[in-house]
C-alpha cells in the first residue's frame, strides 16, 4: 500500500553530523529540499487562505450587520461553546495523524478511515453532555436550539478536517488548499442565501449545516487524486490514535477552551451586545493570524521529520520560521492599533459595533505574541514535547478564568464594555505562554541573530507608524497602503531580509509560476 497518483517522495537525507555546507551556515541540499517543500506547502495554503478569508470575512460582516450586535452575540456564544467541546471529537488528530502520516505514508488509508469513524463516535458521545451543559448554564431555548444545530455543523466540519490531516501528513497542501476553498465556498454560499431570505439565527445555522454536508462529496473526489489507499477502520489503529493523540488532545482542549471561556463568562457577566462586540473583534484576530497558522501547518510535518533525521535542519527551519513571524507579526500588530476604527467601520459599521474598536486596539500587541508562540509551539510539538506545552496552556486557561472573573465586571462597570476585560486577560496569558515557550524550545534553536532581526523590524515599524502619523486626516485608502509600503521599504534598506528569506520567497515564486503554467494547460 502507498500513495500512488501524484506521489512525491523526498530524497533520503544523509546522516551527516552537520547540516551546512562548509560551515558557511547555508542550507545543505537536504535542507534545501525541506525548505522548498515548506515553501510549496505555504504557497498553496496562503492562496487558499486568502480566498477563504475573503469569503469568510465577507459572510461574517454580512451576518453581523443582518443580526445586529445582540443576536450576533448569541450566534458567537453558540459557535464558541460547541467549538470548544468539539476539540474532544478531533481527538488530537490534527497533530498526531499529521505527524504519523508524515513518517509512515503507507498507512494513510488506515489513519483516514479510522479517524473518520472515531470522529463520528465521539460526536455521538458528546451531544447529550453538550445540551445538558447548555441547560445548566441557563441559556434560553433559542440559544439552546442554536447550540444543537451547531453540533451538526461542527460534526460535518470535523469530517472535512479528517481529509485535511491526510493532505498535511503527506506534505501535499495543494490538495488541502483545493478542499478548503471548496468547503468554505459551499458553506458561504448557503449562508448568504439564508441571509438574503431574511433568515434568523437558526435558519442561518441550518443553511450552514446543509452547505457543509453538500461539500463532503467534493472532498472525497479531491482525496481520490492523492492516491490514498482504500480507507479502512482498524481497531489497532484506533487505539494508536487514541493513545498517541492524548497530549495533542489536551493541547487542543486548553487552546480552544480559551475562546469558550471568554464567550461563556462574557454572556454571564455582561449584556449580549458586549458579546457581539467582542465576537466581532475576535473575528479580525482569526483573519489576521492566518499567516502564522499557515506557516505552522506547512512547517509541522517537515519539522517532525527533520527533528528525527537532521536536528540541525530542524533548528535552521525553526529559526527561519520565527524570523518570518517577526517580519509579519510586528506590522500587523502596529496596523491593528493604527487602523482599528477604519476596519470595524468597513466591516460592521460603527452604529452597532463602535465599541469593538477599543477591544481590537487592546488586542493589538496580542498579534506579535501569538505569531511567535504559534511557531515556537509548533517546533516544540514537533520535538515531541507536546505534553509540557499543553500543560503550560492548561495553566493559562485556569489563569484566564480568574482574570476574566475580575476584569470583565471591572471593565463593564468602568467603561460599559466588559469585552475590554476579556481582551486584557487574553493578552496577559499570551505573555505567560511566551515565557513557557522560551523555556521549552530545544536549546540552540533561538540563534543570537534573531535579536538583530528584531531591532531592524522595530525600526521599520517605527517608520511605518511615522508615515501613518504624517498622513493623519488623509483617506485610509491612501494611509494604509503608504504605511505598509514604508515598512517594506525600510525592512529592505535595513537588511531585515537575508538571503535565506530571499531564497524562500524565490522558491515560493518559482513554485507559483510552475503552478500557473500547469493550470493553463
Image (cartoon, rainbow, N blue to C red):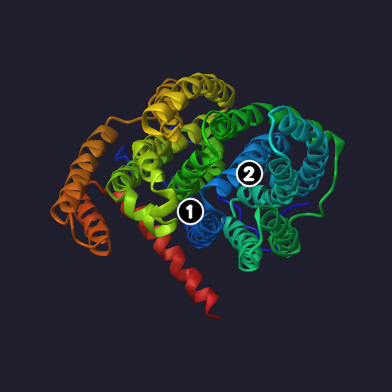
Question: How dense is the environment of label 2, judged by Cα within 10 Å: few (below 14), some, or many (20 and up)?
Answer: many
On residue 79, the disc is: 2
Give the residue displayed 43% in from the left and 57% down from the top.
Answer: 347
Give the residue displayed 47% in from the left and 41% down from the top.
Answer: 278
Residue 71: give x, y in percent of width and height. Answer: 58, 48
Q: Determine the secondary structure under disc 1.
A: helix
Can residue 13 be seen by looking at this rendering? no
On residue 133, the disc is: none
Q: Closer to the observer: label 2 or label 1? A: 2
Cα–Cα gap, marks 2 and 1: 28 Å
Q: Which residue is mark 1?
A: 42
Residues 145 and 53: in front is 145
Number of marks: 2
Q: Name the outermost residue toward the left.
A: 470
Question: How dense is the environment of label 1, judged by Cα within 10 Å: few (below 14), some, or many (20 and up)?
Answer: many
Give the residue displayed 51% in from the left and 32% down from the top.
Answer: 270
Amino acid at each position: 500500500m502507498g500513495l500512488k497518483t501524484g506521489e512525491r517522495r523526498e530524497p533520503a537525507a544523509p546522516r551527516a553530523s552537520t547540516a551546512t555546507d562548509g560551515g558557511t551556515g547555508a542550507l545543505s541540499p537536504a535542507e534545501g529540499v525541506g525548505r522548498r517543500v515548506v515553501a510549496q506547502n505555504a504557497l498553496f495554503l496562503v492562496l487558499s487562505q486568502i480566498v477563504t478569508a475573503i469569503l469568510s470575512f465577507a459572510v461574517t460582516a454580512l451576518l453581523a450587520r443582518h443580526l445586529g450586535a445582540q443576536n450576533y452575540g448569541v450566534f458567537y456564544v453558540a459557535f464558541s461553546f460547541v467549538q470548544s467541546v468539539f476539540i474532544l471529537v478531533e481527538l488530537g488528530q490534527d497533530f498526531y495523524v499529521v505527524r504519523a502520516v508524515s513518517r509512515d505514508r503507507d498507512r494513510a488509508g488506515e489513519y483516514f478511515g479510522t479517524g473518520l469513524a472515531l470522529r463520528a463516535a465521539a460526536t455521538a458521545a458528546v451531544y447529550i453532555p453538550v445540551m445538558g451543559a447548555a441547560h445548566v448554564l441557563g441559556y434560553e431555548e433559542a440559544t439552546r436550539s442554536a447550540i444543537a444545530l451547531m453540533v451538526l455543523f461542527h460534526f460535518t466540519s470535523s469530517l472535512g478536517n479528517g481529509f485535511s490531516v491526510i493532505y498535511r501528513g503527506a506534505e501535499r497542501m495543494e490538495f488541502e488548499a483545493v478542499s478548503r476553498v471548496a468547503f468554505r465556498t459551499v458553506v458561504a454560499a448557503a449562508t448568504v442565501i439564508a441571509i438574503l431570505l431574511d433568515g434568523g439565527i437558526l435558519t442561518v445555522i441550518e443553511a450552514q449545516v446543509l452547505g457543509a454536508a453538500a461539500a463532503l462529496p467534493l472532498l472525497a473526489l479531491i482525496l481520490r487524486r492523492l492516491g490514498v489507499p482504500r480507507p479502512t477502520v482498524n481497531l489497532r489503529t484506533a487505539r494508536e490514535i487514541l493513545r498517541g493523540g492524548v497530549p495533542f488532545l489536551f493541547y487542543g482542549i486548553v487552546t480552544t477552551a480559551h475562546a469558550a471561556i471568554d464567550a461563556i463568562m462574557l454572556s454571564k457577566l455582561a449584556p449580549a451586545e458586549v458579546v457581539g462586540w467582542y465576537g466581532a473583534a475576535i473575528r479580525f484576530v482569526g483573519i489576521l493570524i492566518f499567516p502564522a497558522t499557515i506557516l505552522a501547518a506547512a512547517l509541522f510535518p517537515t519539522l517532525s521529520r527533520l527533528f528525527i533525521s537532521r536536528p540541525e535542519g530542524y533548528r535552521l527551519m525553526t529559526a527561519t520560521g520565527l524570523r518570518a513571524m517577526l517580519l509579519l507579526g510586528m506590522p500587523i500588530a502596529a496596523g491593528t492599533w493604527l487602523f482599528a476604527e477604519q476596519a470595524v467601520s468597513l466591516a460592521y459599521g460603527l452604529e452597532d459595533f463602535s465599541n469593538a474598536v477599543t477591544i481590537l486596539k487592546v488586542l493589538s500587541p496580542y498579534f506579535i505574541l501569538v505569531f511567535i508562540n504559534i511557531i515556537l509551539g509548533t517546533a516544540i510539538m514537533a520535538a515531541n514535547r507536546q505534553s509540557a506545552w499543553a500543560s503550560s496552556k492548561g495553566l493559562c486557561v485556569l489563569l484566564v478564568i480568574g482574570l476574566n472573573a475580575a476584569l470583565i465586571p471591572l471593565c463593564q462597570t468602568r467603561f460599559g464594555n466588559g469585552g475590554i476585560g476579556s481582551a486584557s486577560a487574553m493578552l496577559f496569558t499570551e505573555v505567560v505562554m511566551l515565557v513557557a515557550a522560551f523555556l521549552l524550545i530545544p536549546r540552540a534553536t533561538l540563534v543570537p541573530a534573531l535579536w538583530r532581526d528584531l531591532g531592524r523590524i522595530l525600526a521599520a515599524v517605527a517608520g511605518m507608524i511615522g508615515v501613518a502619523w504624517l498622513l493623519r486626516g488623509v483617506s485610509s485608502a491612501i494611509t494604509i497602503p503608504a504605511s505598509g509600503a514604508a515598512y517594506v521599504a525600510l525592512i529592505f534598506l535595513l537588511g531585515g531580509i537575508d538571503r535565506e528569506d530571499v531564497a524562500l520567497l524565490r522558491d515560493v515564486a518559482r513554485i507559483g509560476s510552475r503552478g500557473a503554467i500547469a493550470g493553463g494547460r
